[in-house]
Image (cartoon, rainbow, N blue to C red):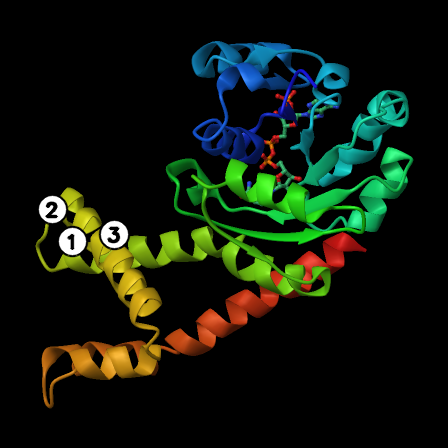
Amino acid sequence: MKYTLGFIGTGNMGGAVLRAALKAVEPQKAVISNRTAEKSGALASELGCAAGTNSEAAGSRFVFLGVKPQMMGSMLEGIKDVLSQRKEHFVLVTMAAGLTMERIQEMAGGKYPVIRIMPNTPVSVGMGMTLCCASAGVTDKDIAEFKDIMRYSGRIDFIEEKLIDAASALSGCGPAFVYMFIEALSDGAVECGLSRAKAMEYTCQTLIGSASLALESGMHPGALKDAVCSPGGSTIAGVHALEKNGFRNAAMDCVKAAYEKTKELGK
Ligand SMILES: NC(=O)c1ccc[n+]([C@@H]2O[C@H](COP(=O)([O-])OP(=O)(O)OC[C@H]3O[C@@H](n4cnc5c(N)ncnc54)[C@H](OP(=O)(O)O)[C@@H]3O)[C@@H](O)[C@H]2O)c1
């Protein structure tokens, strides 16, 4: 097979996953296509991979589908024949929110092996969280190769498809929630006299560090929080202010609202 990777739709998310994948796969082994061909052409020149048509990309070992859910049907209609004529084993990799693997197979016109992924934008800096599930027909070798391709994207976790909406409300939508928190903490620090640039730097590093400590220690966040709060100190005063303003309630509500909306959009 000429290409290991074929990307159809190189927008925000498709482009981000492509950049991560090309750290693991030689660019000569990838072909990309996009509705507006200038976009994939420019990206191909920058990354050193080939620019082609949807049909060319559909002939790859892993065919990444990076178009919006509402475009998926018409895009797959256009490559149906190429897929049905393929003799070698291949895998479709869909990143479309809300579309089940079964729906992708229906639209693609065959029970092809599908890996469904839900990446998030930090994939572009190698710090993403990508949730994955696999249909029947995806082999252990496919999964091993797929993990190898995605090894510079950040963390990867395979879960049951029924959990993907809940997980994507957290990690897929999560960057927006986290950016609001970053902005708000920075605003508070600017009000206290820090420059915007310093406030941003300290906030982001505090978030990265705290998250790394939580992951590496495996400790409950409540215990980690307690360890920072000295009696009668400034941290507990800040914690109280968050509680008074319903911070945890707002955070739980936000994930729940994103989950409900994801389920609604998938219908
Ligand atoms: N953004 C996120 O944070 C995120 C997170 C998880 C999953 N996703 C999923 O990622 C997918 C893409 O989302 P996005 O935010 O990256 O959207 P996007 O920036 O609009 O990218 C979609 C791309 O698909 C191209 N396209 C549309 N129809 C096509 C066709 N028939 N053939 C080839 N290319 C076609 C578009 O080309 P043009 O240049 O002509 O518009 C565009 O570049 C969606 O399914 C979404 O659910 C996104």
Q: Which mark is residue 195?
A: 2
Secondary structure found at label 1: helix
Secondary-structure class at tag 3: helix
List the single residue furthest toward the bottom: 231
Q: Earlier in the sequence, mark 3 or mark 1?
A: 1
Q: Position of residue 176 (x, y in %)?
A: 45, 51
Please state the horizontal and vertical placement of residue 83, each as a whole percent of the image.
Answer: 84, 26
Is label 2 in a helix, a strand or a loop?
A: loop
- Among the 4 quarters of the image, the one containing residue 266: bottom right
Residue 218: image quadrant is bottom left
User: Is residue 106 found left or right of 200 in the rendered image?
Assistant: right
> Which residue is found at the position 43% from the left and 39% from the top?
152
Name the quarter where the C terminus is drawn: bottom right
Whether label 3 touches label 1, CB < 8 Å:
no
Q: Which mark is residue 204?
A: 3
Real-space Cα separation, disc 3 to disc 1, in angstroms = 14 Å
Instruction: Please give the residue where the numbered disc 1 appears in the rendered image.
Output: 190
Give whichever of discs 3 and 2 has the lower sequence position.
2
Is residue 174 or residue 16 the one in the foreground?
Answer: 16
Marks 1 & 2, CB-CB < 8 Å contact: yes
Q: In this image, 40 relative to 138: left or right?
A: left
145 versus 35 height, above or below: below
Q: CA distance from mark 3 to mark 2?
A: 14 Å
> Which residue is rendered at x = 73% and y = 40% of the image?
69
Which of these two is toward me, 77 or 147?
147
